[in-house]
Amino acid sequence: MAISIRSSRPSDIPRSFDIWRSAVVATHDFLTPEDFAAIEVLVRDHYLPVAEFLIAADENDRALGFMGMTGAQIDSLFVHADARGAGVGRRLVEHAVSLHPVLTVDVNEQNASGAGFYQRLGFKPVGRSPVDDAGRPYPLLHLRRG
């Protein structure tokens, strides 16, 4: 599969929400239904409409995944469940490395597939928080590459 990286466009928002939702359902089984519902509203109504992303798209320009960054910090990286294991996330991280040789990312400790993904790409643990950024009981691993 040919994967290209491009900047997000407003027309990507509905597909990005589908990507986010399918990825979270596939990897975040530790979230309570209430927390999932609350986060879903925040992502749909407050994050996706205003943030800029890098989009990983297939040969038909259909978004398969997206990544948000603040400087050299990966803020978000989600791949549609149907495209997991196809190199989409790796391609996004490789693009980020081309922009910033030293990268950081936080990943939910309970998201074993996400933590393993980053560790396979050379990220090492540099810290841990007992709660997520909103104070919910989902510990974060702080990872660094480079």
Image (cartoon, rainbow, N blue to C red):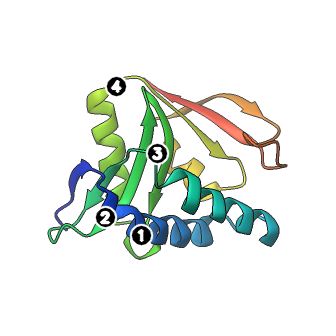
Give whichever of discs 3 and 2 has the lower sequence position.
2
Secondary structure under tag 3 reads helix
* Mark 2 surroundings: few (<14), some (14-19) or many (≥20) residues within 10 A: few
Secondary structure under tag 2 reads helix
Report which residue position mark 3 lands on. Answer: 120
In the image, what residue type sits under mark 1? Answer: Pro
Secondary structure under tag 4 reads loop
**In the displayed structure, does residue 144 sit left or right of residue 127?**
left
- Mark 2–mark 1 Cα distance, whole angstroms, equals 7 Å
In the image, what residue type sits under mark 4? Answer: His
x and y percentages locating residue 19 in the rendered image: 45, 68
For the residue pair 82 and 66, the one nearer the viewer reads as 66
For the residue pair 9 and 105, the one nearer the viewer reads as 9
Give whichever of discs 3 and 4 has the lower sequence position.
4
**In the displayed structure, does residue 134 sit left or right of residue 2?**
right
- What label sits on residue 100 in the rendered view? 4
x and y percentages locating residue 82 in the rendered image: 41, 76
* Mark 4 surroundings: few (<14), some (14-19) or many (≥20) residues within 10 A: some
